[in-house]
Image (cartoon, rainbow, N blue to C red):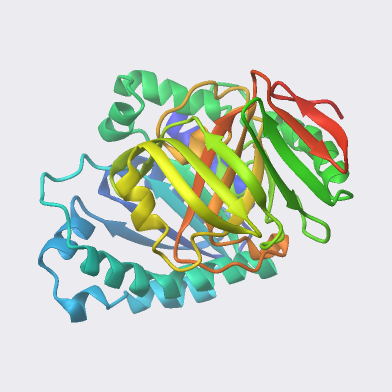
Amino acid sequence: MSWIEKYGKLLADYSLYLKPGELVYVRSNTLAEPLIKAFYKEAVSRGAHVEVELGFEGQEELLLQYGQEEQLKRINQNSIELIKNCNAYLLIRAPYIPMNMPEPDAEKVKLRTKAQAEFSEIYFKRLGDGSLKRSLCQYPTEFGAKQAEMTLEEYTQFILKACFLDRELPAEHWKTLSNIQQKYVDVLNSCDHMSYEHRNWKINFRVAGRTWINSDGKSNMPSGEVFTSPHEDSVSGEIFFDYPSFMMGKDVKGVKLHVSDGVISEWSAEQGQDILDKVFAIEGARKFGEVAIGTNTNISRATRNILFDEKIGGTVHMAVGQSYYQCGGKNQSAIHWDLITDMRDGGKIFADGKMIYENGRFLI
């Protein structure tokens, strides 16, 4: 069985655990066609119905460059109906090399972001009430490899290792990780006051009554994290995110945030200050929607791709913007941006005054 066939089987069998009669909504673009075909075969073989929505190179860039207000405000109604009614949703990321076009007008970007908010709202609410199964995954492309500073072959092997697709029975390895993470989640779900700490920063938050999620490959592929949404007004202190990020088509590095009563009051970046300014102008973006701890030791380096980087074993991340309703979070925003920092050299996590994590490893 080729790695693509194995990938399609893992997504259909383990990540989405498809059943006869279920409706699956697949979104991707033309570069991911081999994986779409492999997944389609597995899904149909299990009796599922599959609807595929494909984008093409430069589609959103062209719309932002040449679209008028009415076009920018329009959202595909078929997409809305599908996200409302499907049983399972699969998003396969397969990025093209961006077109060499002028930076889009900020007002156009705002219009487009607002138009896409309806889809995001439905999506997050359905995740929150448990009515939607979803998986987000990555197909290796030249641009993804370039971002990660790898050759395409190196990047492909990186993805296979991150997803356990280099093993004979990848699903069995995900089940093992799931059991390990469940022990962490059981402890965290009994805690209230928490803090992430390093030598030069400390940030506090409360999680009582919020639900920690065992992310074990059924929502993202790859996965390997435990996460929740903090009490929105409880976050205070400061934090430095040392891992690079990629937002709005640009690199952002060295982000430092000051937080008081849940609101980000000051922000700075060693690179990408203009991106921070744009993000924090978005409604709801100055509050935190997620706190999380990465556990996937098969991912050991940053790739400028949040799907992988937030799972790096020995890191923590916090997301500004949209909360996860399934965790009990209440913050709403058109953005959910994960920012990551390394804890393997002096990082600590305290829960109700007890140290439960040190130097990138749980102590529980």
**Quarter of image, res 215:** top right
Vertical position of residue 73 compared to residue 262: above or below:
below
Q: Nearer the viewer, residue 140 or 322?
A: 322
- Residue positioned 17% across, 62% down in the render: 105
- Residue positioned 56% across, 66% down in the render: 124
Q: Nearer the viewer, residue 200 or 86?
A: 200
Q: Nearer the viewer, residue 167 or 278?
A: 278
Q: Position of residue 339 (x, y in %)?
A: 51, 42
Q: Position of residue 33 (x, y in %)?
A: 32, 45
Q: In the figure, is residue 65 to the left or right of 252?
A: left
Q: Does the image show residue 112? A: yes
Q: Quadrant of the C terminus?
A: top right
Vertical position of residue 80 compared to residue 95: above or below:
below
Residue closest to the far bottom = 70
Q: How many marks?
A: 0
Q: In the figure, is residue 174 to the left or right of 8?
A: right
Q: Does the image show residue 42? A: no
Q: Position of residue 276 (x, y in %)?
A: 38, 49
- Residue positioned 60% across, 42% down in the render: 238
**Quarter of image, res 314:** top right
Q: Position of residue 189 (x, y in %)?
A: 84, 50
